[in-house]
Image: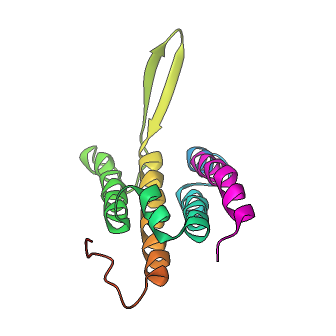
Amino acid sequence: MSSLILRAATRVLAPMMLMLSLFLLWRGHNLPGGGFIGGLVATSAIALQGIAFGPEAARRTLVLPPAVIAGIGLAAALVATLPAGLAALPFFTGLWLKLDLGDGATLPLSTPLLFDIGVFLVVIGGVCAILLALEEDPETDPTEQP
């Protein structure tokens, strides 16, 4: 069953939910939010795509397979731990780098932000893998190409 109202609402809501997830990710260590909550909101947007337009639409939204997204996230989270080790600081010590953008503007980058991005991607990849597996028809192989 396909609902015209659900499809129309999804076209508006899903992009807004994805932007909200990025906002929650960005502000994570200073205020409530972060990679986990941002990832859940992004996954909700992708799940909404799947419900409204089918699992293939959700796969197209993801661009990469969920396992690859989770793997990239895990790698990013692990890389976030390296600078502290290289500086002979305790494990998971947060380090910041301020990039000068000119005219007195700076862009603060940090290992906690990189770790949050990793968590964000792991949550998206993991939860979407579960959701898409539940949507699959048990009679067909999702890896089979037509």
Quarter of the image for residue 2 reads bottom right
Query: In this orientation, which residue lies closer to the viewer: 121 or 142?
Result: 142
Outermost bottom residue: 139
Q: Which residues are magenta?
A: 1-22
Q: Residue drawn 70% across and 56% down? A: 8
Specify whether 25 is left or right of 68: right
Residue 117 position, x and y percent, is 45, 52
Q: Is residue 6 above or below residue 99?
A: below
Q: Residue drawn 30% across and 58% down? A: 75
Quadrant including the N terminus: bottom right
Quadrant including the C terminus: bottom left
Q: Residue drawn 32% across and 57% down? A: 72
Q: Is residue 17 above or below residue 127?
A: above
Specify whether 56 is left or right of 14: left
Residue 22 position, x and y percent, is 57, 47
Residue 70 position, x and y percent, is 37, 64
Query: In this orientation, which residue lies closer to the viewer: 4 or 40?
Result: 4
